């Protein structure tokens, strides 16, 4: 299930305790006490699947971004210390809204960044529902070295997109990559109504191309669907995207 209550709960509770213990020995900033005070509530508000899938170091970074998110701000954007050779991890925290993932994905594409993987979560806070979205990206032409220079453009595109809202027309897909020896990937869309009691699972398998995530999420939003959790994975030319969705009334 989406909540992870079919066997992951015990593991998640252990992970919560382990992450807090890890933080006590890891944090060395001037805001250690503030970070430690905020972390338990952040962990409790995040889905169990998040705890299982994210590293302790990344979780502390995400918690810090959420804690520092200014009240009333459209978004907070943070690039994490590089832990992978082929990707930079970006964390975007923002008040949840209809079409948010489509807006973020569109801004990333306009900043000439390519999404290699992503994990999208929502959590409840005293101020409302908040999205904590994590993307592993590289620059379209300059790889990981080009990400830092593109962050200013990304922040500008995010601010523009979130102020204007979701466009009526979907964004344009970029061209398919040049044909290589690997076969083309056939597009398949699968719906699963049984794996979760509260959500429909939409699985999309297709050929990778620029702007793909923005197009898929725009389509979901145009049908009135809210994305509660998303796992985006690219392997070579093949994309396997999984979305947990529901309508506004459940």
Image: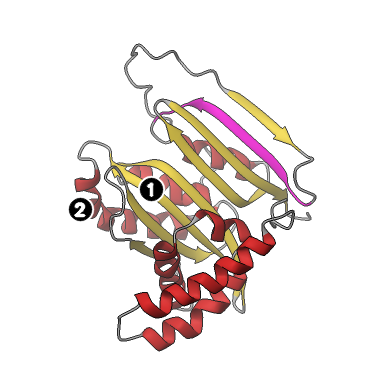
Tell me if mark 2 has few (under 14), some (14-19) or many (20+) residues whose alpha carbon lies within 10 angstroms of its own: few
Q: Which residue is mark 1?
A: 136
Residue 77 at x, y = what percent?
37, 63
Image: 86 above or below 190: below
From this viewpoint, is residue 47 visible? Answer: no
Tell me if mark 1 has few (under 14), some (14-19) or many (20+) residues whose alpha carbon lies within 10 angstroms of its own: many
How many numbered circles are shown? 2
Compute the Cα span from label 2 to label 1.
Answer: 16 Å
Q: Earlier in the sequence, mark 2 or mark 1?
A: 1
Residue 205 at x, y = what percent?
55, 28
Side of 17 where 66 appears, left or right: left
The numbered dot on residue 149 is: 2
Side of 62 where 169 appears, left or right: right
Which mark lies nearer to you, 2 or 1? 1
Image: 176 above or below 153: above
Q: How is the image coloured?
A: secondary structure
Q: Indicate the quadrant containing the C terminus: top left, top right, bottom left or bottom right.
A: bottom right
Quarter of the image for residue 92 reads: bottom left
Side of 88 where 213 appears, left or right: right
Q: Magenta stretch: give its range.
A: 198-209
Image: 59 above or below 217: below
Q: Nearer the viewer, residue 48 or 158?
A: 48
Image: 55 above or below 221: below
Residue 111 at x, y = what percent?
30, 46
Element assignment for label 2:
helix
Residue 246 at x, y = what percent?
72, 49
Element assignment for label 1:
strand
Indicate whether residue 14 is drawn in magenta: no
The numbered dot on residue 50 is: none
Q: Kindly identify the residue that appears in the image at 61 percent across and 70 percent down.
A: 45
Q: Kindly identify the residue that appears in the image at 53 percent across and 53 percent down.
A: 120
């Amino acid at each position: 299930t989406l909540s992870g209550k079919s066997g992951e709960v015990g593991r998640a509770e252990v992970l919560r305790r382990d992450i807090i213990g890890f933080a006590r020995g890891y944090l060395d900033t001037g805001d250690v006490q503030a970070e430690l005070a905020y972390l338990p509530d952040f962990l409790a508000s995040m889905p169990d699947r998040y705890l299982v899938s994210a590293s302790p170091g990344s979780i502390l970074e995400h918690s810090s971004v959420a804690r520092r998110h200014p009240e009333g701000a459209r978004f907070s954007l943070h690039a994490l210390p590089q832990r992978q050779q082929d990707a930079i991890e970006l964390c975007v925290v923002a008040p949840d809204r209809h079409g948010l993932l489509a807006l973020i994905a569109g801004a990333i594409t306009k900043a000439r960044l390519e999404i290699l993987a992503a994990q999208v979560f929502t959590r409840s806070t005293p101020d409302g529902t908040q999205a904590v979205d994590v993307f592993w990206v590289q620059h379209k032409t300059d790889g990981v070295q080009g990400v830092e220079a593109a962050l200013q453009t990304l922040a500008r595109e995010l601010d523009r997109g979130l102020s204007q809202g979701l466009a009526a027309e979907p964004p344009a897909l970029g061209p398919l990559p040049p044909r290589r020896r690997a076969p083309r990937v056939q597009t398949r869309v699968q719906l699963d109504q049984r794996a979760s009691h509260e959500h429909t699972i939409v699985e999309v398998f297709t050929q990778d191309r620029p702007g793909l995530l923005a197009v898929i999420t725009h389509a979901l939003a145009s049908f009135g669907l809210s994305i509660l959790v998303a796992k985006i994975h690219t392997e070579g030319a093949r994309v396997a995207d999984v979305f947990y969705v529901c309508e506004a009334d459940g």
